[in-house]
């Protein structure tokens, strides 16, 4: 193993045990599957609501283009050049330095994020059934509150999500992840477009669209909105924890990495924007709707009341939660694949690695599943004023991911070197258009902007 570690470049080829994508399309579907998740459909509209509407959308788009896209390209280059999991990627490109710790932080973040992500994904699974049966539509906020407080049900649902995720990953990179993503992602796009068209014909849709699309430019100087927009873009594109390094490590040298990255970022952004086209017209068609008060209730407690009051609403609602479950599942796959790959690259059999990591995540998921009312001290963890699930989200999303992203941009821009990344991205010597701009962004703009987010998040925490 150590010999392999000190070797420069990819460890295994197409026939190796670690696996590889079958096609560029398969890779794009899998990486877009990782990016498109609860963050887009549940988180993005919620953040738009909190951030004052269209101005948040505008800032979010700037963050995606100028900060997140360059990091996406950097993670892909690092993954493909090393052919390794996040820890190995740093060991191969910078041997005998402590940089591998950045990879280790990413692997830990994968376990941490999945431990609460699977709880919310469990809610979306249950709401497919509750929409069909009509249960979710009778007094939705009370129903939602009682549902999440049922500890046994929540633990069970989280385990179901983890079992499905593990089952897909056990199939391997090409037969498992790639096959599932190629089926699920087009289905997701189709359902979302269908729902968007349906939502646009609802009464009140126009008011929702104005709120969503017409920016109030006075808000542009509001630092907290920029802070939230960058954090959201980061989480949404699965950056900062090595998910894209891992997926990049299965990528063939023949694939156009920058072009694929553009597809992934484009699809992720499109799904987030489309989710807004569903949620805001639907929300504004309900009297007394206040987008700023969204929270988890925006999806689970508000939308079901609309679904229940319209013709065909049960099916419309069920389709919406099928969509959310598919999105969550393809993201959960990438979250579990990161720690799994870190064991596989250390000589473990895939099956054993998947089982061990799934068991670990399941154990950490229990307190999150019990934190929404089932166990009082988990509903308000002493000293934090937060429930355990929200605490996990803050620790991993607001801290671990931006810190990981900061180090990745410094590493690729300065330590491994932008020139080596460029060589990896242009195997036949053909530099991609905008390469010089990319170097400038990855070396200066990304580290400074992310540092800004970390400092602002810290200030916000200590102030409030
Ligand atoms: N991008 C996913 C979402 O938007 O829901 C969440 C996520 C998946 C974050 C994978 C990080 C990651 F590595």
Image: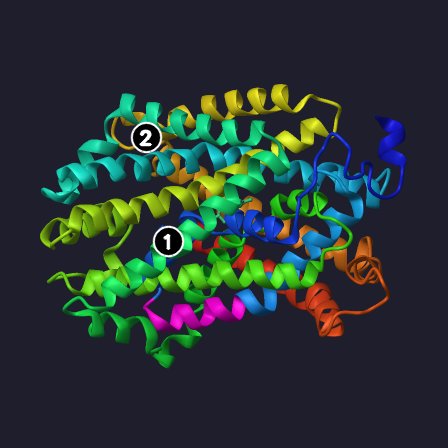
Bounds of the magenta segment: 52-63
In percent of width and height, residue 287 lies at: 10, 62
**Residue 394, located in which quarter of the rendered image?**
top left
Cβ atoms at labels 2 and 1 below 8 Å apart = no
Q: Residues within 10 Å of mark 1 (few under 14, many from 20)?
A: many
Chief SS of the magenta region: helix
- Which label number is shown at residue 320? none
Can residue 99 be seen here?
Answer: no
In percent of width and height, residue 30 lies at: 56, 47
Task: Report which residue position mark 2 lands on.
Answer: 371
**Residue 11, located in which quarter of the rendered image?**
top right
The residue mark sitting in front, 2 or 1, is: 1
Is residue 59 located in the magenta-colored stretch of the structure?
A: yes
Q: Residue at x 11, y 54 (%)?
A: 311
Estimate the spatial distance between the alpha carbons at disc 2 and disc 1, rounded to whole Å. Answer: 23 Å
Q: Secondary structure at mark 1?
A: helix
**Residue 243, located in which quarter of the rendered image?**
top right
Compared to 411, does 103 lie above or below? above
In front here: 245 or 322?
322
Task: Report which residue position mark 1 lands on.
Answer: 41
Is residue 379 located in the magenta-colored stretch of the structure?
A: no
Mark 1 CB near ligand 1 (8 Å cut) = no
In the rendered structure, which disc, 2 or 1, sits on the residue that comes first in sequence?
1
Can residue 329 be seen here?
Answer: yes
In percent of width and height, residue 447 lies at: 66, 61
């Amino acid at each position: 193993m150590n010999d392999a570690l000190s070797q420069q470049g990819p460890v295994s080829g197409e026939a190796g045990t670690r696996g590889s994508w079958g096609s560029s399309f398969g890779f794009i579907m899998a990486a877009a599957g990782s990016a498109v998740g609860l963050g887009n459909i549940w988180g993005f509209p919620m953040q738009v609501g909190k951030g004052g509407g269209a101005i948040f959308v505008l800032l979010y788009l700037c963050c995606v283009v100028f900060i997140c896209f360059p990091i996406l390209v950097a993670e892909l280059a690092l993954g493909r050049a090393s052919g390794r999991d996040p820890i190995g990627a740093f060991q191969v490109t910078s041997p005998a330095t402590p940089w591998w710790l950045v990879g280790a932080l990413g692997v830990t973040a994968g376990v941490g994020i999945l431990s609460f992500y699977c709880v919310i994904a469990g809610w979306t699974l249950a709401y497919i059934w509750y929409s069909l049966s009509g249960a979710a539509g009778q007094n939705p906020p009370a129903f939602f509150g009682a549902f999440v407080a049922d500890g046994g049900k929540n633990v069970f649902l989280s385990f179901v999500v983890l079992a499905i995720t593990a089952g897909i990953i056990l199939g391997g990179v090409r037969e498992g992840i790639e096959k599932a993503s190629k089926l699920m992602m087009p289905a997701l796009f189709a359902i979302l477009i269908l729902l968007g068209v349906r939502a646009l014909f609802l009464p009140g849709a126009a008011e929702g669209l104005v709120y969503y699309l017409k920016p109030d430019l006075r808000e542009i100087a509001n630092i907290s909105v920029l802070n939230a927009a960058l954090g959201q873009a980061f989480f949404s594109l699965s950056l900062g924890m090595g998910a894209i390094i891992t997926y990049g490590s299965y990528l063939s040298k023949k694939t156009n990495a920058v072009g694929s990255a553009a597809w992934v970022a484009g699809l992720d952004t499109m799904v987030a924007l489309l989710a807004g086209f569903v949620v805001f017209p639907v929300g504004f068609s309900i009297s007394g709707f206040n987008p700023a008060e969204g929270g988890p209730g925006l999806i689970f407690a508000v939308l079901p009341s609309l679904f229940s009051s319209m013709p065909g609403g049960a099916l419309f609602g069920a389709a919406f939660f099928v969509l959310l479950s598919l999105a969550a599942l393809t993201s959960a796959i990438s979250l579990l694949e990161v720690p799994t790959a870190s064991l596989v690259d250390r000589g473990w059999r895939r099956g054993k690695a998947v089982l061990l990591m799934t068991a670990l995540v399941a154990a950490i998921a229990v307190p999150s599943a019990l934190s929404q009312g089932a166990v009082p001290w988990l509903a308000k963890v002493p000293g934090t004023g937060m429930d355990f699930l929200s605490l996990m989200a803050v620790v991993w999303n607001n801290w671990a991911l931006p810190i990981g992203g900061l180090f990745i941009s410094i590493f690729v821009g300065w330590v491994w070197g932008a020139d080596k990344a460029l060589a990896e991205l242009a195997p036949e010597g053909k530099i991609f258009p905008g390469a010089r701009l990319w170097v400038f962004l990855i070396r200066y703009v990304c580290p400074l902007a992310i540092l800004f987010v970390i400092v602002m998040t810290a200030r916000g925490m200590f102030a409030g």
